[in-house]
Image: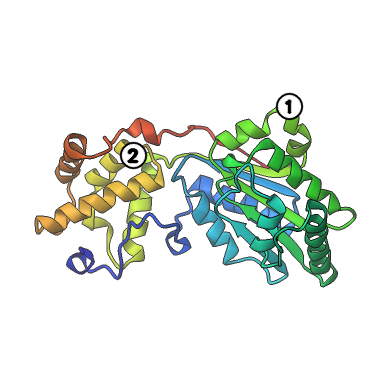
């Protein structure tokens, strides 16, 4: 819609997790280093958490573009329900047959045989589960039991990615054995205001634009209103560019951002509330 108006090659603020647009803030860079550390050093379990829209999936997709050919990777984007058969999900995720009606024992043997075959051919099986906060404790325990096949050789690696609720689940006493197998973990915080400023400039430049299309004052107001959550930044910046296009403007000013926020407050189906974009201010990593 507005791409031609501003001279963009494509839309700069899509909410899709596109690794081409990855902006490595200090925290995102640390998280990526931790993920790469886990892959290269054959960490058993790796856990990444962050608020909705904090950039977790984009990081994972970037990682997948840069891993070695010796990794056989399965990505599960939709977590199994409580009554689903986890082993069927795992086999299908690795493009392995999972005939209906087979017993749990047979499916388990199928999966373990597959992982061992990968290892015998010099590779490793890596399972990445996104939205892992939806996993039931019983499912997490089953994953831990499957990892018991890692004896003298690391054959199966697991990366869990989810919202902060995942850390609460893993802290439960019943999952203490699972938690003890986590080699690397990281929580993604929101972007700092200066990072939001850089993030917006980065996205604009990725599509052939320049920072001045969204004025500095407008960028800082967007940072304030979104609490530094990338997805919320994208949504607000996208709407601001649409407003500017509709008004025939060459750039987005702070006043225009105020207009967008005001209209959304008055007429939006969902009232924009920065508190909904709230994230923990502190972060840490354990390597």
What residue is rendered at 66% in x and 51% in y? Answer: 159
The spot of residue 210 in percent (x, y) is 27, 61
Q: Which residue is mark 1?
A: 173
Residue 22 visible within the image: yes
The disc label shown at residue 23, or none: none
What residue is rendered at 69% in x and 28% in y? Answer: 172
Q: Secondary structure at mark 2?
A: helix
Number of the front mark, 1 or 2 = 1
Q: Residues within 10 Å of mark 1 (few under 14, many from 20)?
A: few
The spot of residue 86 in percent (x, y) is 69, 50
The spot of residue 92 in percent (x, y) is 66, 62
Instruction: Report whether 205 appears left or right of 59.
Output: left
Query: Which of the image's four quarters has the C terminus?
Result: top right
Q: Which residue is mark 2?
A: 226
Residue 287 visible within the image: no
- What's the coloring here? rainbow
Instruction: Report whether 108 appears left or right of 274.
Output: right
């Amino acid at each position: 819609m507005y791409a031609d108006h501003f001279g963009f090659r494509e839309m700069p603020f899509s909410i899709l997790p596109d690794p081409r647009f990855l902006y490595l803030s200090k925290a995102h860079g640390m998280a990526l280093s931790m993920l790469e550390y886990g892959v290269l050093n054959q960490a058993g379990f790796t856990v990444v958490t962050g608020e909705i829209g904090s950039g977790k999936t984009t990081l994972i997709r970037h990682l997948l573009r840069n891993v070695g050919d010796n990794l056989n990777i399965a990505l599960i984007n939709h977590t199994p329900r409580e009554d689903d058969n986890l082993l069927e999900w795992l086999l299908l995720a690795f493009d392995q047959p999972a005939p209906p009606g087979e017993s749990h024992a047979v499916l388990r043997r199928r999966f373990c045989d597959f992982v061992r075959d990968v290892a015998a051919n010099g590779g490793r099986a890596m399972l990445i589960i996104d939205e892992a906060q939806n996993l039931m404790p019983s499912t997490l325990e089953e994953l831990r039991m499957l990892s018991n096949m890692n004896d003298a050789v690391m054959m199966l690696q697991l990366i869990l990615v989810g919202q902060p609720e995942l850390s609460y689940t893993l802290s439960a006493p019943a999952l203490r054995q699972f938690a003890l197998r986590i080699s690397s973990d990281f929580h993604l915080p929101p972007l700092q205001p200066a990072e939001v400023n850089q993030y917006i400039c980065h996205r604009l430049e990725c599509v052939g634009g320049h920072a001045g299309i969204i004025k500095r004052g407008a960028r800082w107001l967007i940072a304030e209103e979104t609490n530094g959550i990338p997805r919320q930044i994208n949504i607000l910046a996208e709407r601001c560019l649409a407003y500017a296009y509709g008004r025939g403007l060459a750039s987005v000013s702070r006043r225009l951002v105020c207009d967008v926020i005001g209209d959304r407050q008055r007429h939006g189906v969902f009232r924009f509330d920065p508190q909904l974009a709230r994230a923990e201010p502190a972060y840490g990593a354990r390597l």
